[in-house]
Amino acid sequence: MATWTAGYVADVDYTYGFYRELTPAILAYVGLAQAKRTPDPNTRLTYCELGSGQGLTTNLLAAANPDIDFYATDFLPAHTAEAQRLAAEARSPNAHFYDQSFSEFANEPSLPMFDIVVLHGIYSWVNAENRAAIVDFLHRKLKPGGLAYVSYNTLGWAPATPLREIMYRYGASQGGSSGKRLGSALGLMDKLVAVDARYFKSYPGQKARYEGLKKLDANYLAHEYFNEAWSLLYHGDVAAEFAEAKLNYLGSAHLLDHIDVINLSEAQRELLASVEDTTVREMIRDFITGQQFRRDVFVKGASSLSPRETNLGWLEQRFVLSALPADVQMKVTTLQGEAQLQSDVYEPILEALAGGPRTLRELLAMPKIAALGAAKLTQALSILIGAGHAQPALAARGDAARTKRTRAFNDAVFARAQDGNSIAFLASPVTGGGIAVGRFHQLFLLARQRKEADPAAFVWSILASQNQRLVRDGKTLETVEENLAELRTDYDEFVAKRVPLLTQLGIA
């Protein structure tokens, strides 16, 4: 049993993360953008997450997609126990969690065949034997026509490799828990910065990287930097391994990555267009952009949609805002910097979606938007989705059933918010995915749900009972009056700006 972890960090829990790209509606949108037939998230499907951590993503998606059966495994029993506990609190009968290794999971008799299999980050953190087990799982358990999502560190990380290696090896030499090893490694790196190690001159961006990582969650850092297996992979490596499971590359789940007009110069676009081989073209794209983390979607047997089916798919696709129009800046951050957005294109779209979810057909019926044309409109919507300002939405006919289930999940999160801030996402029945909502806003929603006369006082009663205080401009607010005043200001802004958006998303 001493080697059951296979070098994976097992003595500290992973964070409660929700990873938007794993949302079924997002994965289906990748297929639509490529005019390929993929599993329809509005129908009965089966879905599997390998390496599910604390299980937040699978639990949230199970609540927001009650017609999909979700299965997940994480070989750390503490993670699985926590995932099962949240599923019970959220009353999600379609969420099933296991603590098996990938090879064991492939032989689990209770598993169905899957329409979708996802794994986030894990592929970079496991050894070659476990990567082979993942490929075997995809070969045996993914249905023909099914999707596989895999994210991984790429060679754009190469300059940081010495940084990670020194941290890992020095920490290991000091022994102790992952937390102790991390502390030792960070202490060494501080000294290396202080003595002006030439590495930081040879690779100027790495000093800023190190200063940034010191601000991250310690448990996240332990899992990111201190696994024995830590692989940087070329897209060609992953594509070749997945080909053994009969999978072909479909596209990126991070939609901005493949909108070349905002990522690449004209000369770069011409160069890429001259490369016929898809795999080599993706590797050259990564070389041009300095890509550090890929979010690849593969399909097991790509079937093209006809022009009629593609057009109908776009017309029936629904969209919803996940940011207020006033908060959307007319620029997006790309792999190579910032790209400006044309206000005459985006403002009419934002104005239309501010009235609630709309299908593409409904948007094109509006004169200002019709003038843009379908091609420009779909590209603009993809950019808004990629930037996190909008989301592809599920069909309206399922909103009521999904709302019942997401309310149960969100109530479970509200209950936990009274004790701490471990979960920062709520489930949306409109998108079938998660929306970032912080602890105080969760408590404001709970107060409104309970019809509390003074929501700010309700939140303060919880904080005061835990001897917690608010901070403003870096200063802790000590008196009751100061804390209540701050909470009332926050609540008024929440009602004015956030509640209308959360209402459209089916959360408030």
Image: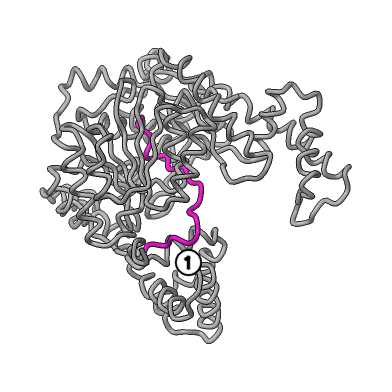
* 311 vs 227, nearest the viewer: 227
Magenta residue check for 14: yes
Side of 8 relative to 63 (left or right): left
Q: In this view, does 170 lie above or below 256?
A: below
Residue drawn at 17 percent across, 41 percent down: 140
Residue 380 can be seen in this image: yes
Q: What stretch is highlighted in magenta?
A: 8-25
Quarter holding the C terminus is top right
Secondary structure beneath dot 1 equals helix
The residue carrying mark 1 is 209
**Secondary structure mostly taken by the magenta-highlighted segment of the chain:** loop
Amino acid at the residue labelled 1: Arg
Residue drawn at 18 percent across, 53 percent down: 271
Q: In this view, does 337 lie above or below 47?
A: below
**Which residue in the rendered view is the most extreme toward the front?**
1
Q: Is residue 237 above or below residue 50?
A: below
Q: Where is residue 202 in the image (x, y as percent from the top left)?
A: 39, 79
Q: Residues within 10 Å of mark 1 (few under 14, many from 20)?
A: few
* 237 vs 274, nearest the viewer: 237
Side of 130 relative to 426 (left or right): left
* 141 vs 80, nearest the viewer: 80
Residue 469 can be seen in this image: no
Asked which quadrant contains residue 138, the reply is top left
Q: Where is residue 102 in the image (x, y as percent from the top left)?
A: 28, 49
**Which residue in the rendered view is the most extreme toward the bottom?**
195
Side of 492 relative to 191 (left or right): right
